[in-house]
Image (cartoon, rainbow, N blue to C red):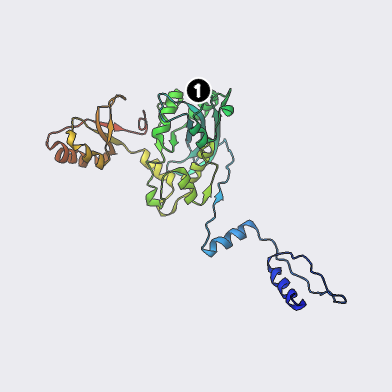
Amino acid sequence: MASNFEAQRMISQLDMFGEVAPTSREPGEVKSSRTRTVAPTASPEDMVRTLEESGNYRILRKLPARKIIPCRRPEFPLVGVIVDTETTGLNHKTDEIIEIGAIAFSFDDRGNIGELLGVYGGLQQPGGPIPAEVTRITGITDGMVEGQAIDLAALRSLIEPVDLIIAHNAGFDRPFCERFSNVFANKAWACSVREIDWSARGFEGTKLGYLVGQAGFFHEGHRAVDDCFALLEILERSGGQEGRPFAELLRTSRQSRVRIFAEHSPFDMKEHLKARGYRWSDGSDGRPKSWWIEVDEDALADELAYLRAEIYRWDDADPPTQYLTALDRYRA
């Protein structure tokens, strides 16, 4: 059995970690008058700072919510909207939107973001059961959408005044949105995946979850409005030497791009075209049945020179081209 002195020493050591149950005393033993000093409770920010300064931890902070300020300042005359959809599948011709989220905000011509102007989120019951895999990813169940319908009037009031629609993978969202309502047609669209060089900004991927996490935040992902809010914060916050991502997105969206169709290219050249980034079009969407690529307008001459020298091997080859602006990029 440990001596009384040893027991007191053990208690003293344990005092560093919290309360200790009192020990029994020998008859006639005098209770010590020593009092323990209880350390004050550290604030969450103090604890975060201590952990981060140790170099062994990286803390994610929850993205803060923005307040809606419907009256924008005159120095932010333009309106943008971030749109996100959840769908029953990947094919806009056969699958359906089950949720749509949209947040409108003001901005200026240099890409500075002003106020949050409005928010819409709505569920829609599809024509059949939601696939189990979709429910697993989004958390949206058949019970949640039963009897639900997206409010087209509310959505239209948010979308009609905008100067630019942004989606994180506009090639997916734009065809679904335009099939759902003509309010999305004839609008300028931008893609925050393809029109921002995230790699140059130090990000390891372009998925929204990667961007949010590497920026030091977390959010409730795979619900439409939550994803819209998360993207808005990342577009404004992740600046540095490269400037804010939204400013880059705005500049890129205003540039013309050219789609080149390597029509009638030799069959044995397909691996060369694939390696260069060309994709195959089967002609079912109205495009030429051929391999194609989309490049910046100032890269057109170099790409045509490559096709003539390496693919067609004919100096007068003249493959079809299609000029694209934000008004028609990412259409189906």
Give 105 or 321, whichever is nearer the viewer. Answer: 321
- Is 29 on the left-hand or right-hand side of 273? right
Q: Is residue 73 above or below residue 204?
A: above
Residue at which label 1 appears: 128
Q: Quadrant of the N terminus?
A: bottom right
Instruction: Indicate the secondary structure of the residue bearing disc 1.
Output: loop
Tell me: 53 left or right of 195: right
**Could you say which is closer to the camera, residue 7 or residue 87?**
7
Amino acid type at image mark 1: Gly
Q: Is residue 196 above or below residue 55?
A: above
Q: What is the quadrant of residue 15 in the picture? A: bottom right
x and y, in percent, of residue 287 in the image: 28, 26
**Label 1 crowd bin: few (<14), some (14–19), many (20+), radius 10 Å:** few
Identify the residue at the far right of this view: 28
| Residue 48 percent location from the top left of the image | 58, 58
Residue 43 position in % (x across, y down): 65, 58
